[in-house]
Image (tube, helix red, strand yellow):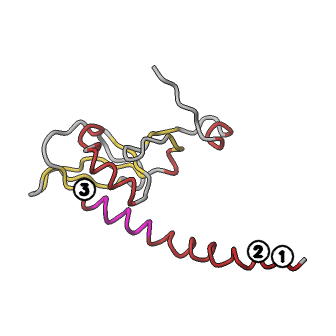
Amino acid sequence: MVQHELPADARARTGVPVRTCVGCRKRELATDLLRVVVAGSGPEGSLVTPDLRRRLPGRGAWIHPDPECLSLAERRRAFGRALRVSGPLDISAVGLRVAAEAERSAPARDVESSTEPLEEKRHTQS
């Protein structure tokens, strides 16, 4: 069995669960990942839904709340394997949640990138 190196902050905090993202296959703290479960059957297949409180019954899969990880998981058909479900999966609810998370974190990234030139100017002037 291959052992993977944990992120530095995961090693520092003991007792915090570490999970693997089904999209990018990186190990992260469970608090940094979104848990998804099969919540029932719909017209388009088994309904995969985000478990925001991490309390829903059933087998769960973990994914970064990032559109890239979601597209990787879709392309690799990782949700079906991780959740041990055969047949088509309806992951539209997960896609909406990931999009909302990405939209929420996007303005913070813009603020960070806009402050970088100011810091560079400050260093060149002194």
Residue interval drawn in magenta? 93-102
Dot 3 corresponds to which residue?
91
Circle 3 crowding by C-alpha within 10 Å: few under 14, some 14–19, many from 20:
many
Q: Which secondary structure, mark 2?
A: helix
Which residue is label 2 attached to? 120
Residue 106 locus on image (x, y percent): 50, 72
Residue 124's disc number:
1
Quadrant position of residue 49: bottom left
Q: Residue furthest left?
A: 43
Residue lying farthest to the front in this orientation: 124
Q: Position of residue 88 (x, y in %)?
A: 14, 48
Report the amino acid beneath label 2: Glu
Labels 1 and 3 touching (C-beta < 8 A) = no
Mark 2 and 1 residues: CB-CB less than 8 Å, in contact?
yes
Work out whether 97 lies above or below 40.
below
Taking 121 as reference, is 81 left or right?
left
Q: Residue at x 39, y 49 (%)?
A: 35
- Residue drawn at x 68%, y 77% is 115
Label 3 and label 2: CA atoms lie apart by: 43 Å
Residue 76 magenta: no
Q: What's under tag 1, amino acid-wise?
A: Thr
